[in-house]
Amino acid sequence: MRAFDIIAKKRDNKENNHFQLIKSGIKENVIQGLLGLSLYGGNFDLIQETLVEYSGNSDENIRGIAILCFGHIARIYGKINTELVLPIVQKGLKDKNSFVRGHSHSALDDIEFFVK
């Protein structure tokens, strides 16, 4: 097995671990999984799709972290689907919860700075 294949397999295993945490339904695990996936995942489209899904969660902590993670992937990948993500972030700026509003501000700052 070539070194690249070994690294890819390890990355895939880590990504699967993040998804297992997310799918557990336990708030702390979901948050940890979303953060891990956005920071260490390798499939931009899948990460963004997952964040979109969880940005509408009824739990303000999960919702806020999902929105914050849009900023992380914007910083890491230098891109984001602005037509899809910006309305979500803008909605988060008006959220009733201050945690969500704060993370929405952070995500918007990162998107504006890193996405050209």
Image: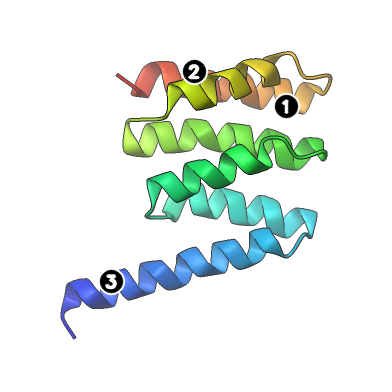
Lower position in the chain sequence, tag 3 or tag 2: 3
Q: Are marks 3 and 1 in contact (CB under 8 Å)?
A: no
- Residue 69 is marked as none
Q: Residue furthest left?
A: 2
Left or right: 96 with respect to 23?
A: right
- Where residue 47 appears, as percent x and y from the top left, is 48, 47
Question: Tag 2: residue type?
Answer: Asp
When the figure is inspected, residue 106 is found, relative to residue 69, above or below; the finding is above
Lower position in the chain sequence, tag 1 or tag 2: 1
When the figure is inspected, residue 87 is found, relative to residue 29, above or below; the finding is above
* Residue corresponding to mark 3: 7
Which element is circle 2 on?
helix
* Residue corresponding to mark 2: 109
Question: Label 1: how many residues lie within 10 Å, few (<14), some (14-19) or many (20+)?
Answer: many
Q: CA distance from mark 3 to mark 1?
A: 35 Å
Left or right: 46 with respect to 68?
A: left
Q: Quadrant of residue 90?
A: top right
Q: Residue furthest bottom?
A: 1
Q: Quadrant of residue 61?
A: top right
Q: CA distance from mark 3 to mark 2?
A: 32 Å
Residue drawn at 18 percent across, 76 percent down: 3
Instruction: State the quadrant of the N terminus.
Output: bottom left
When the figure is inspected, residue 41 is found, relative to residue 115, above or below; the finding is below
Residue drawn at 66 percent across, 58 percent down: 22
Instruction: State the quadrant of the C terminus.
Output: top left
Q: CA distance from mark 1 to mark 2?
A: 14 Å
Question: Label 2: how many residues lie within 10 Å, few (<14), some (14-19) or many (20+)?
Answer: few
Question: Tag 1: residue type?
Answer: Val
Residue drawn at 30 percent across, 69 percent down: 8
Question: Tag 3: residue type?
Answer: Ile
* Residue corresponding to mark 1: 100
Which element is circle 3 on?
helix
